[in-house]
């Protein structure tokens, strides 16, 4: 899975399931009331026999009143997107994962740049920036180049003259990121944090043994998963938090506090520097932790219990939120949507083909939020934040991730301009193959997607983690 989602906010954190197509959605605010509107129920397990064309995929998306969906880019201009970010010119940089799900060192994955040069809402210029990656899972831009996660390697690809051509070979900053187990539970996603560090999330199964190229085995750092970060000028890597199962996306609220989505177990965690999180999963790094911090969500998006697959395709799981797999994280900090969506959490629900939305609110030294009608998201019972489910605007039904063009500036200058109202998302080819834009006004409610035969009842949301301020 992947997490590449970002909407009207700084920028999403990018990752998505390989095989998905990039979409873009734009939301505009309306003077109408903010009351949620229920969309008609749709069969949760409907199947689309053939992939829809990009235009048809956008046309058949069912969205809340006030939303419009238009195509930004689709196949064959973009294929297998697994990560997205934006540069200081508002262009989309997309990591395409052709090698997924086969680990190895064979080149083939690539980075492309999409641009809308005439401002009509459609990408009309496409550039292949780099095509020699082995297993790309994340991308960011800044400081004169592209930062790329492609286990077992973490690269910097320089382009200091900004001519969209690498200045030289990709530089291996670190190696040893795990790629020995399954296809998706590994280091992924990259996003600039408010402190100027480059953050990423990391699954548990493909644990890593990190170091700079040539570092002796005994001097390498074993990392069992969670959240890590890298300083772009001091070239220092460090673990930020330890735990969870398979996080795919990180983002920050107005106060610089971090949140991640997660798969298999509860979907939402408030991330604190140096903390250890549930589940333990026999991590040596957490064996002697005084206490491991649980989720801040009070509910699950799946009903399978210990076997997360037991509820696949059932009405009960559909009502719970869609499933156990999430990718992409966004805390909405824009000002184009109704105020009640600001500072709330959005994440893609892969199997549910929807976007989930959680409210976040303080609860003493923690945060809590009231539950509202709609598809469930998350509420916190412990931790410093609490989140509960909410009915929100959904841009499209898909296993997607996206992001808002923000400013992943290539210099150390902070980008202070307010975020707009555009969301870029990716969707799986069997649902829709395109990058779409959607402009919206209220009322907000779960989005539902009907293809020729398909459907999905989805709670709203988007993902992004943001390259905000480089300092």
Image (cartoon, rainbow, N blue to C red):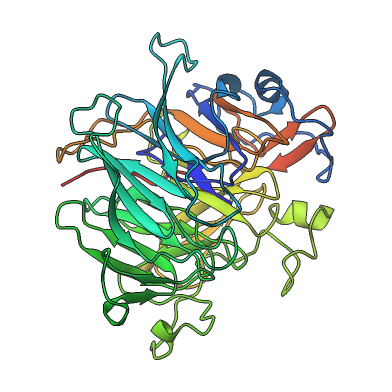
Rendered residue at 72%/56% (across/down):
320
In depth, the one of 236 and 324 nearer the eye is 236
Q: Is residue 439 visible?
A: no
Q: Say how many tags the image has.
A: 0
Task: List x then y, in percent, for residue 293.
Answer: 45, 76
Task: List x then y, in percent, for residue 237.
Answer: 26, 64
Vertical order, 370 against 284 (above or below): above
Task: List x then y, in percent, for residue 122.
Answer: 50, 15
In depth, the one of 457 and 19 nearer the eye is 19
In depth, the one of 227 and 362 nearer the eye is 227
Rendered residue at 47%/33% (across/down):
338
Q: Is residue 262 left or right of residue 60?
A: left
Q: Is residue 213 left or right of residue 31?
A: left
Rendered residue at 84%/34% (across/down):
49
Vertical order, 392 against 198 (above or below): above
Q: Is residue 235 left or right of residue 268?
A: left
Q: Is residue 61 visible?
A: yes
Identify the image quadrant of residue 86: top left
Q: Is residue 270 left or right of residue 198?
A: right
Vertical order, 213 against 128 (above or below): below
Task: List x then y, in percent, for residue 250.
Answer: 41, 54
């Amino acid at each position: 899975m992947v997490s590449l989602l970002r909407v009207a906010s700084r920028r999403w954190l990018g990752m998505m399931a390989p095989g998905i197509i990039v979409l873009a959605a734009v939301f505009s605010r309306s003077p109408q009331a903010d009351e949620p509107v229920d969309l008609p129920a749709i069969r949760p397990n409907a199947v689309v026999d053939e992939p829809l064309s990009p235009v048809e995929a956008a046309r058949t998306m069912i969205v809340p009143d006030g939303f419009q969906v238009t195509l930004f880019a689709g196949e064959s201009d973009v294929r297998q997107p697994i990560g997205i970010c934006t540069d200081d010119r508002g262009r989309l940089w997309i990591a395409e994962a052709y090698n997924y799900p086969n680990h190895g060192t064979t080149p083939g994955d690539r980075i492309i740049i999409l641009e809308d040069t005439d401002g009509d809402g459609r990408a009309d210029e496409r550039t292949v920036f780099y095509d020699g990656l082995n297993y790309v899972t994340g991308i960011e831009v800044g400081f004169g180049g592209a930062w790329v996660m492609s286990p077992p390697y973490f690269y910097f690809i320089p382009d200091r003259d900004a001519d969209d051509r690498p200045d030289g070979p990709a530089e291996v900053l670190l190696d040893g990121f795990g790629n020995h187990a399954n296809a998706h539970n590994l280091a992924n996603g990259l996003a600039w944090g408010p402190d100027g560090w480059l953050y990423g999330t990391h699954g548990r199964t493909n644990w890593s043994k990190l170091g700079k190229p040539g570092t002796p085995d005994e001097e390498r750092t074993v990392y069992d998963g969670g959240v890590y970060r890298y300083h772009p000028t001091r070239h220092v890597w460090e673990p930020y938090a330890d735990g969870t199962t398979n996080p795919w996306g990180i983002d920050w609220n107005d106060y610089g506090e971090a949140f991640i989505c997660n798969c298999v177990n509860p979907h939402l965690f408030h991330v604190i520097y140096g903390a250890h999180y549930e589940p333990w999963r026999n991590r040596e790094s957490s064996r002697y932790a005084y206490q491991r911090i649980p989720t801040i969500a009070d509910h699950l998006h799946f009903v399978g219990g210990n076997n997360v697959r037991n509820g696949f395709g059932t009405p009960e799981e559909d009502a719970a939120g869609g499933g156990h797999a999430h990718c992409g994280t966004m805390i909405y900090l824009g000002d184009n949507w109704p105020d009640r969506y600001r500072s709330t959490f959005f994440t893609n629900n892969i199997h549910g083909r929807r976007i989930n939305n959680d409210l976040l609110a303080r609860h003493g030294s923690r945060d809590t939020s009231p539950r509202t009608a709609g598809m469930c998201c998350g509420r916190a019972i412990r931790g410093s934040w609490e989140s509960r489910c909410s009915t929100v605007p959904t841009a499209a039904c898909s296993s997607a991730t996206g992001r808002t063009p923000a400013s992943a500036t290539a210099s150390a200058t902070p980008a202070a301009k307010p975020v707009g109202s555009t969301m870029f998302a990716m969707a799986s080819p069997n649902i829709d193959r395109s990058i779409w834009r959607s402009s919206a006004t209220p009322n907000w409610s779960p989005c539902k997607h009907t293809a020729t035969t398909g459907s999905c009842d989805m709670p709203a949301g988007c993902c992004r983690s943001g390259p905000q301020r480089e300092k």
